Image (cartoon, rainbow, N blue to C red):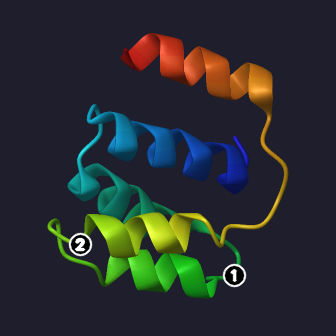
Amino acid sequence: MDYRTKAEFFIRGITGGFIEAAEVIAWSDEIIVSAPKSEDWMVEISSCGPDDRLAILGHLNTVKGTVDEAALAEMLKARQ
């Protein structure tokens, strides 16, 4: 799973009300540990609090890459 697709999933989840900011923060913490190189958006999300939904959305929008629409649709279907 690429970061851009997962970021888009979280954006839709937060705005749709079926994902809490704490889940995104936990994801960011996990990838900081496992990623070969930390990116700014990872650190920024990791340092947010669970009430910082707008800040988290802003950081998620900075994740580079291309959304895998098929993978995104599967993730959304599984959560809604």
Q: Residue furthest left?
A: 51
Mark 2 Cα shell of 10 Å, populated few (<14), some (14-19), many (≥20):
few
Q: Give the left or right position of residue 30, taking residue 62 as reference.
A: left
Report which residue position mark 2 lands on.
52
Quarter of the rendering containing residue 65: bottom right
Seen at 56% across and 79% down, the residue is 41
Q: In the drawing, does residue 32 fall left or right of residue 13? A: right
Q: Which mark is residue 14?
A: none
Residue 36 drawn at (x, y percent)? 70, 75
Q: Which residue is mark 1?
A: 37
Relative vertical location of residue 65 with respect to residue 75 in this rendering, above or below = below
- 44 shown above or below 71: below
- The residue drawn where x is 73% and y is 48% is 2
In the picture, measured across the screen, residue 68 lies left or right of residue 5, that is right
Dot 1: what SS?
loop
In the structure shown, which secondary structural element does the residue marked by tag 2 occupy? loop
Three-letter amino acid code of the residue under disc 1: Lys
Q: Residue flagged by tag 2: what amino acid is it?
A: Asp
Quarter of the image for the C terminus: give it.
Answer: top left
- Residue ranking furthest to the right: 66
Q: Is residue 75 above or below residue 53?
A: above
Q: Residue at x 77, y 67 (%)?
A: 64
Tell me the residue at 54%/64% (across/down). 60
Residue 58 is at least partly visible in this image? yes
Q: Residues within 10 Å of mark 1 (few under 14, many from 20)?
A: few
Camera sees residue 33:
no
Q: Where does the image place residue 14, in percent across and percent down from the top left?
A: 35, 45
